Amino acid sequence: MGRIALVEDHERLAQLVVKALAQVGIPVDTFGRVDAAWAALREGDYEAVVIDRGLPDGDGIELVRRLRQARLSIPCLILTARDALHDRVDGLESGADDYLTKPFAIEELVARVRALTRRPAQRLNTVDSFADIELRPDGGMLVCSHEVITLAPAEMQIMLVLLRAGGQTVRRNALELAAWGLTEAVTPNALDVALHRLRRKLLAIGSVVRISNTRGHGYALVEA
């Protein structure tokens, strides 16, 4: 399961959501303001975003509108204390995919998030294979013909981004964001170590795919 973004300024609620999603294997980056979330969503590769309407610097619906105007089809779940029909309609017409009214059961939120990330319409532009390799996120596996090797969570997220780029170059900071998010402390060479391990694993399963480094630009998958 890929990383999701949570835009919620209520610290206690944010902690509960993060904990609940972590228990089902979904990593989360949290943001307390619209501007911070907007900056991250433009750069990161998120599977979905959960957005509270009442934020310190604006209505969460405005963030959804900005995402849609930028042609970013990331699934959006709106959280709100407003239960009026016109409020729900406003949220959905802004481009949100789902709407959950507070207070809610945390189990329901988890179910809604998982449902959003499984929607085929939102995954049309994703690629989970390249040349002779296939990524199986549910099993944490990288496959080449009949050879299979397991990937660590960070390796899985890095490979997922590279696969979906389809041979196009991905910036270093985008790979770091996908692997560890904005809140997890990592060493400066963590990405280099993860890429080294991925290169060795590609060789181990006999793949023709290599991870190319274009100095000053980023990384891409290529066929040897």
Image: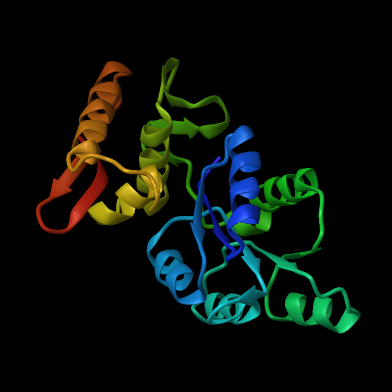
Q: How is the image coloured?
A: rainbow
Which quadrant: the N terminus?
Answer: top right
Q: Is residue 43 left or right of residue 29?
A: left
Query: Residue at the location (65% across, 55% down)?
Result: 13
Q: Position of residue 184 (x, y in %)?
A: 37, 44
Does 217 appear above or below 73? Answer: above
Residue 171 image-quadrant placement: bottom left
Query: Residue at the location (58% across, 57% down)?
Result: 11
Q: Position of residue 124 (x, y in %)?
A: 58, 56
Q: Residue lying farthest front?
A: 12
Does 70 appear above or below 10? Answer: below
Q: Nearer the viewer, residue 200 or 221?
A: 200
Q: Is residue 174 left or right of residue 19?
A: left
Query: Residue at the location (28% across, 17% down)?
Result: 204
Q: Nearer the viewer, residue 173 or 159?
A: 173
For the question of whether residue 169 can be seen, the reply is no
Which quadrant: the C terminus?
Answer: top left
Q: Number of labelled discs? A: 0
Q: Is residue 70 left or right of residue 223?
A: right
Q: Residue lying farthest left?
A: 215
Q: Position of residue 221 (x, y in %)?
A: 28, 43
Query: Residue at the location (23% across, 29% down)?
Result: 199
Q: Is residue 101 left or right of residue 128?
A: right
Q: Position of residue 64 (x, y in %)?
A: 60, 75
Does 128 appear above or below 170? Answer: above
For the question of whether residue 35 can be seen, the reply is yes
Q: Nearer the viewer, residue 87 or 98?
A: 87
Q: Residue lying farthest right?
A: 85
Residue 89 image-quadrant placement: bottom right
Q: Nearer the viewer, residue 176 or 124?
A: 176
